[in-house]
Image: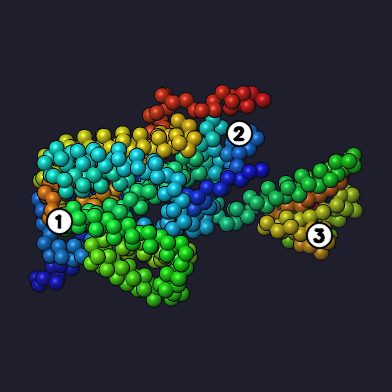
Amino acid sequence: MHVEETELPGLGVRKDFMTASGRRIGVVVHRDGTTEFILSTWDDPDTCQASIPLTSQETTTLAQLLGGQLIVNQLTEEHRDVPGIVTRQFSILHESPFRDRPMGTASIRTRSGVSIVAIMREGEVIPSPGPDVVLHASDLLVAVGTLEGLDKAAEILRKG
Amino acid sequence: MDQLALTLIELGGVVFVLGLLARLAGRIGMSPIPFYLLGGLGFGAGGVIQLGGIRDFSHLSGEIGVILLLLMLGLEYTADELFTGLKKSWKAGVMDAVLNAIPGAAVALLLGWGPVGALVMAGVTYISSSGIAAKTLTDLGRLGNRETPTVLSVLVFEDLAMAVYLPILTATLAGVGFFGGLQAVAIALAVISVVLLVAMKHGHRVSAIVHSENAEVFLLTVLGAALLVAGIASALQVSAAVGAFMLGIAISGATAHNATRMLEPLRDLFAAIFFVAFGLSTDATTIPPVLGWALLLALVTTLTKMVTGWWAAGRAGIGKPGKVRAGAALVARGEFSIVIAGLAVTSGAVPAQLAALASSYVLIMAVLGPLIARYIETWAKPFIRPRKAAVANAGGAT
């Protein structure tokens, strides 16, 4: 993937690349460190349809959302040869009964046979989390299991 | 009432009115420069209210304003950016200079202001306002657009060109003749080369001299250094403003960033007073006779900037909508046109009417520029088709 880096003299740097669907996507990093997310219009790659200023927290969250997908993609790739095994990500919602409680209290593996292989939190990855890891709102759980098991695990995390 | 009380009241009144004008400009999303100019015209000779007491103060403050404007312009760029900008965009830069200087010079000659007047007006119509352009691009969310680096590199070239032009102008206005002018150019070019080299190799050392963790110490050191360098440059006939610009380029990295933050309020204050001072020195009654010329210049130099932007963006492989936007982004003239006209008027080497023409021209262009940049796509839409429409439609069907 070729990421183009262009100096914007006096203002900052633009970093972007072209997607397969023909849209330019990337960021403008200003001198003062603020970041803008940019996306070109569908009919003209020169023009930006949106340039959205992001706070550092928003940048982290967006990176986390995309990073979670990255892990899922890698795991799916690895499990490709094992039929029936699926990788999926769950986010801990604010109203989840297991928010601010150790993951072990949900007994996901016992009840659904699903393994939580990683937790993404504020841009960091917690690999193979133990039962003592306390879940926070907006954590992303990367889970591996059967389709039925994953549905069950999702329900557990939502309703308890 | 004694003189001091009167001066304070006048100054306070002027600054307060400027505050109101800046607020109004912000409310309608416009550059405050035309408002400041109008304010100055209103207060000045032939205007609504006559102010005499603050003339001396506003003159000196205006000079400091120019120095701060150029210092902060230099702080914005690193020497590397200037160098690559120069390498990449010199052709577009030269075309920009030729196309946009000629109309100003021609009108000055037609009005019988001689070669000096032509040199001044050439600068006034040539130089775009990088401040207004950068703000417009940011406000319109166009920083991520592909034509934006092209626009910015043309602006960088213009700013560097100022560093050569201003010493020539200063020398010419001082009436040093042809060889004196050549000497000024030689000194200016030598100084610019040395400063760029020093800034590229030893920029961190210059930064280290002025740098301090203490805000107060830092402010005083940077400001003191800027005024000193400007003064020395002025004594060498290289123009005070260019000295400050060079110092700004030499300061780099985090120090430059801090200095920008620290000096911004000071720049805003002194630059505002500078625009008012220019307005004050312009007799408002001399504007109507030159208004037609100002409008003609506005029309012609809008087109020449559009051509420049179109051509420069075309070289960078940009599509038609981007080319049009690039041209429109360059249209605004502002602070530096006034700096040039201000230098000329203060020297007394040009007719007073030049101040009237320059201020009415900048008034028009500072308002027109951002408006054209904003609406050009809508106006141009019937005439240009997006470059990829066919491909995108095919993609949309899947």
Q: Amino acid at mark 3?
A: Pro
Foreground residue among B191 and B37: B191
Query: Dot 3, how many residues are within 10 Å of its Cα: few (below 14), some (14-19), or many (20+)?
Result: some
Report the mark closest to the observer, 2 or 1: 1
- Residue with the mark numbered 1: B175
In the rendered view, does B180 fall on the left or right side of B226? left
- Using the image, tell me which numbered label, if any, was put on residue A22: 2
User: Which part of the image, by quadrant, shows the C terminus of chain B?
Assistant: top right
Q: Amino acid at mark 1?
A: Gly
Foreground residue among B89 and A36: B89
Residue at the (73%, 52%) spot, across then down = A140
In the rendered view, does B183 fall on the left or right side of B379? left
- Using the image, tell me which numbered label, if any, was put on residue A129: 3
Residue at the (45%, 30%) spot, across then down = B320
Foreground residue among B272 and B198: B198
Report the mark closest to the observer, 1 or 3: 1
Query: Dot 1, how many residues are within 10 Å of its Cα: few (below 14), some (14-19), or many (20+)?
Result: some
Query: What secondary structure is marked by label 1?
Result: loop
Report the mark closest to the observer, 2 or 3: 2
Please say if the residues under marks 2 and 1 sit with CB atoms less than 8 Å apart.
Answer: no
Query: Dot 2, how many residues are within 10 Å of its Cα: few (below 14), some (14-19), or many (20+)?
Result: some
Label located before the other in sequence (2 or 3): 2
Residue at the (12%, 59%) spot, across then down = B51
Which chain is mark 2 on? A
Q: Amino acid at mark 2?
A: Gly
Can you give x and y, in whole percent of width and height, for residue A34 in the image? 52, 55
Which chain is mark 3 on? A
Residue at the (54%, 25%) spot, across then down = B389
